[in-house]
Amino acid sequence: MEAWLPIDTWNGRMQAVGGGGWAAGMFELSYMEMAGAIGDGYVAITTDGGHTSLDPRDWALVSPGNIDLYALQDFASVPLNDVAFIGKSLAQSFYGQPPKYSYWSGCSQGGRQGLMLAQRYPTAFNGIAASAPAINIGQFLVANFWPQLIMNLLGQYPHSCELDALTAAAISACDGNDGVIDGLISDPDSCRFDPYTLVGTKINCTHTGLQIQITEAAAIVANASWNGAQSSNGSFLWYGLNCDAALTGDLGISNTECYNNGTCVGMPLSISTEWIRLFVQKDPMFQFYNMTHQDFDHIFHASVQQFTSIIGTNDPDLSEFRNAGGKMLTYHGLVSYPLTSTSQVQD
């Protein structure tokens, strides 16, 4: 998809816009960014990566056990170079000259696409803004399931109020370590908050309107979320979240849902379960609740082994992009999204 400007308002530049989640582009957020680019005088372009559906169940597998590798490669990398070539060619045809400069702008999945361009297609764009790039997809999409695995193995699912209270307590304990009280833990390496010290503490849970106690299970889950995934022999697999990252909510990796009878169940991130089910296990009917720790180890290893070369973007060698005159701006935050507390520790 490309959007055009009248000839007398074009600034001579093209901006390509990336995707997010399972979208290679051409979804509501990319349309918003394209509108902003057009307002600044750019020709704007994006791509759906060859996928008309944002649901990977529609394209991931050709049959159970068999990934559609062409579809995955299209999602991962191939159309990124194509969209640069097509956009420049269409600008040449429409305006009579190619863009003077071409830029890529993307966040999360779009940021990963930006890094892929710099690493694999270094001459496609002159400049790349790779915001919050999803660099190590093969690792972190499996690792995001780690606290859910812990809950399944425990057979206990803490109320989100408990986890929110532990997050708020961690922020309170470590916020000032950088010398500024601002609701953020800006020096995460100095934070030594121990969630087990609050086990048994009463909290007011706004979800239920009742007082509940922080359980040992909540401390175990919070600790696992912060320390990161470990193998069944205790060795490191992948990093956890910083202590001020929200563990619950739509994007929380430790999220649970609780019913009126007090029963709670785990609510894993769908992007992680889809990755494990469709791409790693290659089985759309794969069930998570009987997964052992050894199963998790195997899934993590298989994900890294099979997909890093296809969709990973952790190659530090950007010399070809540099030699082509390319410039990149990239950054990453320390937490997933701001916490809205739903619980309050009682003095």
Image: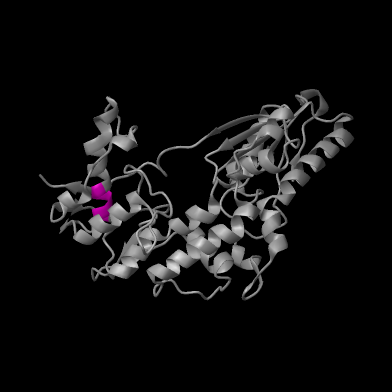
Q: Nearer the viewer, residue 215 or 36?
A: 215
Indicate whether residue 164 is drawn in magenta: yes
- Horizontal side, residue 166 vs residue 184: left or right: left
Q: Nearer the viewer, residue 292 or 106?
A: 292
Name, please, the residue furthest toward the left.
347
Residue visible at 48% across and 67% down? 298
Indicate whether residue 282 is drawn in magenta: no
Q: Residue 241 appears at what percent x and percent y?
A: 38, 47
- Horizontal side, residue 301 vs residue 76: left or right: left
Characterize the magenta stretch by its predominant secondary structure: helix
The vertical placement of 168 against 54, above or below, is above
Q: Residue 39 appears at what percent x and percent y?
A: 67, 29
| Residue 31 appears in the figure | no
| Residue 301 appears in the figure | yes
Residue visible at 60% across and 46% down? 313
Please identify the quarter of the rendering in which residue 15 is found: top right
The vertical placement of 338 against 161, above or below, is above
Q: Nearer the viewer, residue 82 or 47?
A: 82
Residue visible at 32% across and 42% down? 244
The vertical placement of 178 against 289, above or below, is above
- Horizontal side, residue 143 vs residue 28: left or right: left
Q: Nearer the viewer, residue 4 or 49?
A: 49
Q: Residue 125 appears at what percent x and percent y?
A: 73, 34
For the record, the magenta segment spans 161-166
Please identify the quarter of the rendering in which residue 50 is found: bottom right
Q: Residue 257 appears at what percent x and percent y?
A: 33, 63
- Quadrant that contains the C terminus: top left
Residue visible at 67% across and 59% down? 72
